[in-house]
Image (cartoon, rainbow, N blue to C red):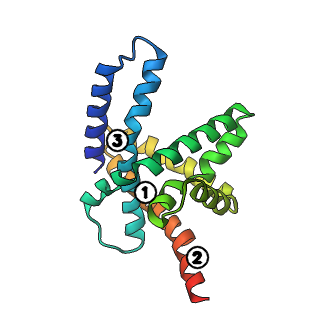
């Protein structure tokens, strides 16, 4: 799926490069980047949902990665809200931006999986992650380090590291949000 994602990203970027040449202005680059999000974000969320489905022991279908284009509007709203808040946080002493970038980790999945609204998903993710923020921070750093190391030998290690990371985050999501739902139902 990552190969397909890569091909779609290259094609999208190529088309947008023709329409908005990056050489001319920074504005063109910003517009092209923003216009690629509605194409790439639903696929990224689909890959994330594969990790969550794996954690739930549900059947996996590669084609299900493409099922989230119907939710592009709420996903875009989450993307915009998160981007603005994280950017503001980075501009205000850097640390608030780092905090928010980790705290909003599960926002997209909560919108897609639980059907939450944009702000509701972002707040639930933030409140849940904040309880153990440093553990998530170290996991994010470890994930980045793992990707960098696995990319060194011609990117071959990415075949294992990227799916492993998505499954790890899927397991965390399942533990944090599905187990909570089951506990509420049992009460």
Residue 151 or residue 167, whichever sits in front:
167
Q: Which residue is mark 3?
A: 39
Q: Residue furthest right?
A: 93
Which quadrant is the C terminus positioned in?
bottom right
The image shows residue 174 at horizontal and vertical percentages of 49, 70
Residue 121 or residue 183, whichever sits in front:
121
The image shows residue 42 at horizontal and vertical percentages of 38, 49
Residue 73 or residue 124, whichever sits in front:
73
Which numbered disc flags the more N-terminal residue, 3 or 1?
3
- Is residue 161 among the parts visible in the rendering? no
Q: Which residue is mark 1?
A: 166
Which numbered disc flags the more N-terminal residue, 3 or 2?
3
Q: Image point 42% across, 62% down: which residue? A: 167
Element assignment for label 1: helix
Element assignment for label 2: helix
The image shows residue 34 at horizontal and vertical percentages of 44, 32
Mark 3 or 2: in front is 3
Task: Measure the C-alpha gap from mark 3 to mark 2.
Answer: 32 Å
Task: Measure the C-alpha gap from mark 1 to mark 2.
Answer: 21 Å
Q: Residue 112 — which label?
A: none
Few, some or many C-alpha atoms within 10 Å of disc 1 (few <14, some 14-19, many ≥20)?
many
Few, some or many C-alpha atoms within 10 Å of disc 3 (few <14, some 14-19, many ≥20)?
some
Q: Is residue 20 above or below residue 141?
A: above
Task: Measure the C-alpha gap from mark 3 to mark 1.
Answer: 20 Å
Few, some or many C-alpha atoms within 10 Å of disc 2 (few <14, some 14-19, many ≥20)?
few
Q: Which residue is mark 2?
A: 180
Element assignment for label 3: helix
Query: Residue 60 is drawn in which quadrant?
Result: bottom left
Query: Residue 25 is drawn in which quadrant?
Result: top left
Q: Residue furthest top?
A: 24
Which numbered disc flags the more N-terminal residue, 1 or 2?
1
């Amino acid at each position: 799926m990552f190969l397909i994602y890569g091909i779609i990203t290259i094609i999208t970027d190529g088309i947008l490069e023709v329409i908005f040449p990056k050489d001319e202005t920074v504005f063109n680059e910003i517009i092209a980047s923003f216009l690629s999000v509605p194409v790439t974000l639903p696929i990224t969320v689909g890959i994330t949902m594969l990790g969550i489905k794996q954690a739930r022991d549900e059947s996996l279908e590669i084609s299900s990665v493409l099922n989230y284009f119907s939710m592009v509007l709420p996903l875009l709203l989450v993307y915009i809200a998160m981007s603005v808040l994280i950017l503001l946080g980075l501009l205000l002493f850097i640390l608030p931006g780092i905090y928010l970038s980790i705290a909003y980790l599960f926002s997209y999945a909560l919108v897609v999986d639980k059907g939450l609204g944009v702000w509701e998903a972002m707040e639930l993710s933030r409140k849940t992650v904040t309880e153990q923020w440093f553990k998530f921070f170290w996991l994010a750093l470890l994930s980045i380090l793992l990707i960098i190391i696995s990319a060194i030998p011609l990117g071959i290690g990415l075949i294992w590291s990227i799916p492993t990371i998505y499954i790890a985050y899927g397991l965390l999501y399942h533990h944090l949000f599905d187990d909570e739902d089951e506990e509420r139902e049992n009460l």
